[in-house]
Image: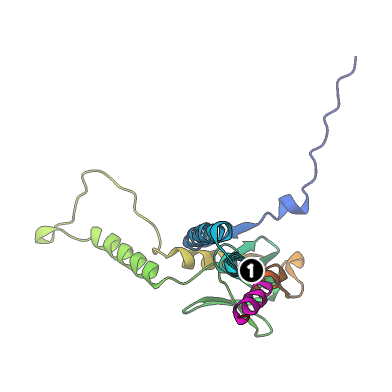
């Protein structure tokens, strides 16, 4: 009687070895879903109950607006793994191996710069001055909590509470920090080298352009 041989574990595939982290803007996704719901409600009502050219105008308007709303709200995302980052903006998809990334810059928007000097906006990680101010106030309150009470005596908490280590950061700044860490960790890896590729999102541009042309024709016809 023989015992079954133990099968060796399956080797890691590139998909399992380099799994993407996905970064999106929750507020953008929520706002886009709301706008698309309103557009669908009004557009379908015009298609069903409209008379004359109204259904055609509604159809052209939907064909123009739906791709644009989805492009600026639902579409933006950043996919990052140990090899590269892929930035999906409203009208373009930029793939940057970590070896080509020079720096990240945050001003009124977040941008990634490659080693040729080209810069690309990161739509999925917006800069929120309100979130930064909120994080600064939270950090200030945390520092004040460890101060002194009345008569200069140290404050004694009735129960020990966990204290955050490190500065409090806005969510967008935390994401950029994580991307910087990936560049530092993998920027010199052999599998993280290559060329920057930029692809236009024709799946967004084509229907929006068709809707704009159709709407212009309908409005120009008396």
Asked if 15 appears above or below 221 in the picture, the reply is above
Q: Position of residue 144 (x, y in %)?
A: 24, 62
Left or right: 49 with respect to 149?
right
In magenta segment, residue 211: yes
Q: Position of residue 207 (x, y in %)?
A: 68, 69
Asked if 162 appears above or below 109 in the picture, the reply is above
| Viewer-proximal residue among 215 and 166 | 215
Tell me the crowding category of disc 1: few under 14, some 14 to 19, or many 20 or more residues within 10 angstroms, Cα based. Answer: many
Residue 9 in which image quadrant: top right
| Viewer-proximal residue among 4 and 172 | 172
The N terminus, quarter of image: top right
Q: For the residue labelled by badge 1, is the local secondary structure a helix, a strand or a loop?
A: strand
In this figure, what is the number of numbered marks? 1
The C terminus, quarter of image: bottom right
Can residue 40 be seen in the rendering of this structure? Answer: no
Residue 122 in which image quadrant: bottom right
Prevailing secondary structure of the magenta residues: helix
Left or right: 47 with respect to 213?
left
| Viewer-proximal residue among 100 and 35 | 35
Q: Residue at x 57, y 64 (%)?
A: 51
Q: Residue at x 71, y 63 (%)?
A: 83
The boundaries of the magenta stretch are 210-220
Q: Position of residue 218 (x, y in %)?
A: 63, 76
Can residue 60 be seen in the rendering of this structure? Answer: yes
Q: In the current view of this chain or complex, which residue is farthest to the left?
A: 151
In magenta segment, residue 64: no
Q: Residue at x 30, y 66 (%)?
A: 137
Q: Which residue is mark 1?
A: 87
Q: Position of residue 135 (x, y in %)?
A: 36, 65
Q: In the current view of this chain or complex, which residue is farthest to the right?
A: 1
């Amino acid at each position: 009687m023989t015992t079954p041989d133990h099968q060796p574990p399956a080797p890691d595939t590139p998909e399992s070895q380099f799994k993407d982290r996905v970064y999106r803007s929750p507020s953008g996704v929520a706002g886009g879903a709301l706008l698309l719901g309103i557009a669908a409600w009004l557009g379908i009502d015009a298609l069903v109950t409209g008379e004359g050219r109204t259904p055609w105008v509604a159809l052209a308007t939907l064909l123009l607006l739906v791709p644009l709303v989805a492009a600026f709200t639902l579409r933006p995302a950043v996919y990052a793994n140990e090899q590269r980052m892929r930035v999906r903006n409203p009208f373009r998809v930029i793939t940057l191996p970590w070896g080509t990334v020079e720096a990240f810059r945050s001003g009124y928007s977040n941008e990634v710069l490659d080693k040729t000097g080209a810069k690309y906006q990161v739509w999925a990680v917006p800069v929120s001055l309100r979130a930064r101010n909120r994080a600064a106030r939270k950090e200030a309150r945390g520092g004040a909590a460890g101060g002194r009470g009345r008569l200069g005596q140290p404050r004694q908490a009735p129960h020990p509470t966990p204290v955050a280590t490190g500065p409090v950061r806005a969510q967008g700044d935390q994401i950029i920090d994580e991307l910087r860490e990936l560049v530092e960790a993998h920027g010199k890896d052999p599998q993280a080298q290559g060329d920057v590729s930029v692809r236009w999102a024709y799946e967004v541009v084509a229907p929006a352009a068709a809707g704009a042309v159709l709407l212009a024709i309908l409005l120009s016809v008396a």
